[in-house]
Image: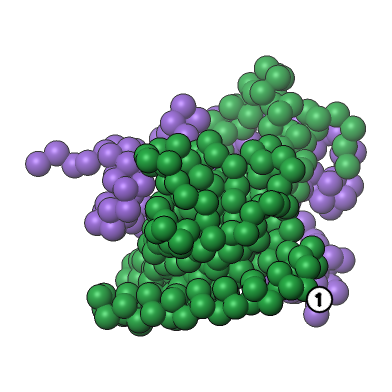
Amino acid sequence: MAQPTDLDLYERIRQKDKEALEVLYDRYEKLLYSFAYRMMKDSQAAEEVMQDVFMKLWRGKGAGQYVSGRGKFSSWLLTITRNASIDLIRKKKVQEVEWDQRDSVHEDLPGVEQEIEDKEERNQLRRAVHTLPDEQQRMICLFYFQGMSQREIAEKCDIPLGTVKGRVRLALKKLREHLEKEGGIVYER
Amino acid sequence: MNDKPCDHILDYINDQLSDIERKQFEKHLSECPRCQEELKEMEDLMGDLPTYMEQTEPPAGMKQRVLDEVFSNEEEDTAPVRTKRPVKWKAWSGVLAAGLLLSIGMNVYTGLEVSDLATENEQLESSLTEIQTALSELEDSESGTASPLQQTELASAEGTNAAGTATLLNRETRQELLVQTQNLENLEPGEVYQVWLIEGETPEPAGAFTTNDTGSGGVAFTINEEKSWDAVAITKEPQTGNQTPQGEIILQAGL
């Protein structure tokens, strides 16, 4: 029996088919959880992100609505996972700042090892990030993994606001070039 | 924060804009090919990064916890959670029925003569009794206990003696609207009194009824959709089944 495509499942989810959500969950659990875990660096927070993502998907409103034509379904799922993570990071940060003033001052150059901590040998992303110059590593870390605003990045890195976009783009582009040499895991069905 | 709209693209991607800023940027995006291209490029660059990341084993039991939470919240969603919202439906009723009394709820009394008040009270008391009877009948006919969430007197249009009450009932996981009226004008054959539930400025049909010789009538309606209703209104319609009102508002109240 042919496996239902992601879009088949999404359509069924819109019809409130619980089984379809479960199938989609099984298909993406590991990818989304791993990603959320990389973003949050905490298993409980990552689970909170998962909760948020699947709640949005099930409700199918606003951010939980997939518009085909705006890229692959899997990319869209990853985008809402990333947004849910950024959202939670920000909420947690607000709490931290309230009782830990050091947070804003104590921002040493975040070693990407520390941000994307990795115990396994096989981690293409980490390897690829490492090939980049420090400044580009930092752009990826602050923009991609911490979800910071343009202004925050400009302040943290002490660079003009207007240059942030170009630097982030360049860093992502370079990262991409390294990654494409290796090839990733294909999830889309 | 930034001067040029194009400068918002990073914050748009990172979901860092306020609702207003986001809408502004989306409007700009629809008109700016360069931003469209940049956004597409950024999305392509970032889209699959997680697939290159090290995989982490999900904690035991997460699937059950996540899905249970999703589905149980869904059930709560359909259960009514009612919060008072500002009345936004005036535009709707205004367009439809200029010159009608727009006062809502208790305000109607200030416009009435004291003598009218006494009559009104009497009428309302009797309709309340009728509603209670109808309520207990409903309880008998179906399982599940109903409890009134809100009861409101309907305000009548100027120049009519129409009166009535609307009651929102909670029954298990759904809601019912019970409408009871009197002193309504007699209908022409084919005409009906139509009840509308209004969310914002959008009316939705919520049951229709005809009246007896003395101008009394009412209807019980099961509310299937989870919405935060702002108002209830009754119009006279030339036929049943209208999806939007044609006739003027006879009775109305904010919820």
Q: Residue furthest top?
A: B33
Left or right: B143 with respect to B80? left
Residue B190 appears at what percent x and percent y?
Answer: 37, 39
**Between A118 and A27, which is closer to the camera in this rendering?**
A27
Residue B248 appears at what percent x and percent y?
Answer: 59, 42
Which chain comes out green in the rendered image? B
Which chain comes out purple in the rendered image? A
Q: Is residue B182 above or below residue A95?
A: above
Left or right: B22 with respect to A115? right
**Between B134 and B225, which is closer to the camera in this rendering?**
B134
Residue B107 visible in the current orientation: no
Secondary structure beneath label 1 = helix
Q: Residue at x 47, y 59 (%)?
A: B215
Q: Amino acid at mark 1?
A: Glu
Q: Residue at x 86, y 33 (%)?
A: A162
Q: Is residue B53 above or below residue A132?
A: below
Residue that badge 1 annotates: A98
